[in-house]
Image (cartoon, rainbow, N blue to C red):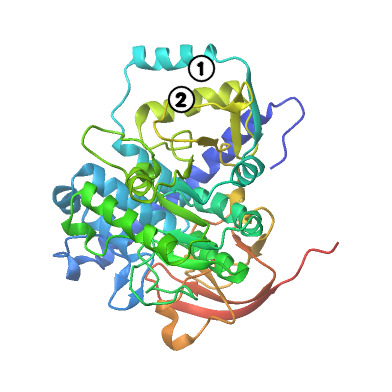
Amino acid sequence: MKPRKGIPSVIVIFLLLCTSLAKAQYQLEQIKKYTQLVAPAKKDSLQNNLTNKIGNNLHYLYPIYQAIAWEKRFKRLLGDVAYNDYFSQFLSMAGDYQSASNYAQKKYVPLSNSQKRDIKNYVDELTGLQSINAKSFITGSSINSKVLMINEMYHQPQHRAFVYSLLKDLYNNGFKYLAMETMANRPGKVIDEVNIFTGEYTSEPVNAELIRHAIDLGFTMIAYDDTAATKHTPNVRDSIQAVNLYQVIKKDSTARMIVLTGFGRNSNEALVPGHTPMAMAFKKISNITPLTVDQVAISEGSYFESGAEFYQQFTKKFVITEPSVMLLDKKPANLLSAPGITISVVHPPTVFVNNRPTWLSLEGDRKETPIQPTEKGLFLVQAYYHNEYHADILGQLIPADQTYIAANNGYYSLYLKPGKYKLVLRDINYRTLSVKDITVEKESQ
């Protein structure tokens, strides 16, 4: 959609967002009707968690069936906050980023009018800020760092897309290890591919692309999570993570490492009394101060209410068109006074084209590829790398991209690197309607 003459671009972005939101809501309504008729989750109604795994196979629509068909039960089991968190994560894995954002924000406690005014007044009074490209600034700032820790929100693949953009330059700067909390920690297992067994969140396609990219560049992949995390307190889990990371440094004194972790674990200081975040614990045992990068506080769908409101107000006042670091007196501004953070990244508002976020291009490594809806009853479109595809283990493989959100013209837009793919077309029951070969050509120079 191109802006008509005289219509401000911000209105066009708003209209595109509304279109994407309407499509997402329509597709969830279709799933709701389907679960009412077929009740696919009824046979497993005694499960205690939402899951996209049935045995050793991935089923990307299954947790959405569960969450919709058995909403009251799972809210009672998990609580409203956890229900919305998990549901948002599985929606993002299926390529429904707008719904994922909506459900993630349902956990917010509404701010009072006075709190909103205070935030607006604070933003209005901000002066002297300059923006700089976040990728360039972080790459430059990492020159003398041994460990760089950057965080993510589990339902927000945009954060993984940004880490993807950093990898090549950081590798050239001497970072040869990539440690990811999301990978399954199986001691002795060399991680040289990505599939259902790689980790809980690595079945999200952008996360899988991040791992593939890192392996192709030559990174050594490190799984460092606490293997008994569900039985431990947050303090114990973070401490064990810190020890696991320190083992890499002890074995290789020349090691330079990127660490991707969740939410506030990359803080060098305590966020709440009595809790020692992973980065703080790592600093204590290693005597290494990590370069810490936050990209979740000042982001769409920030993990706390005032952060989300700040982001809305901030991006109204300051035009952010790329991941940026805000400088004040030539130093990174800590706009939300986040403890233990060196650099804060501000992501631009998501732009949707054909109802898909444009950050899925991974800085141009992938191109938007329209998929014609040739099959009757088509609901979900998936593209698997041709060299990874095996029909007998399809359920164990991670798509390069997938979505059930069609463009307004009925086509599905996938973001794919040049190369050969197996296109898997499924109905709303997750049945395979057809498998096709497609080739994505390189852009002509």
Give percent across and percent down for residue 372. Answer: 62, 67
Please report whichever mark, 2 or 1, sits nearer to the chain's N-terminal start.
1
Callout 2: 10 Å neighbours few (<14), some, many (20+)? many
The residue at 29%/46% (across/down) is 84
Q: Which residue is mark 1?
A: 123
Q: Quadrant of residue 174?
A: bottom right
Q: Residue furthest right?
A: 445
Q: Amino acid at mark 1?
A: Val
Q: Amino acid at mark 2?
A: Phe
Q: Quadrant of residue 49?
A: bottom left
Q: Closest to the observer: 135 or 238?
A: 238
Q: Which residue is mark 2?
A: 310
In this picture, residue 186 sits left or right of residue 377:
left
Q: Quadrant of the C terminus?
A: bottom right
Q: Secondary structure at mark 1?
A: helix
Q: Secondary structure at mark 2?
A: helix
The residue at 35%/67% (across/down) is 184
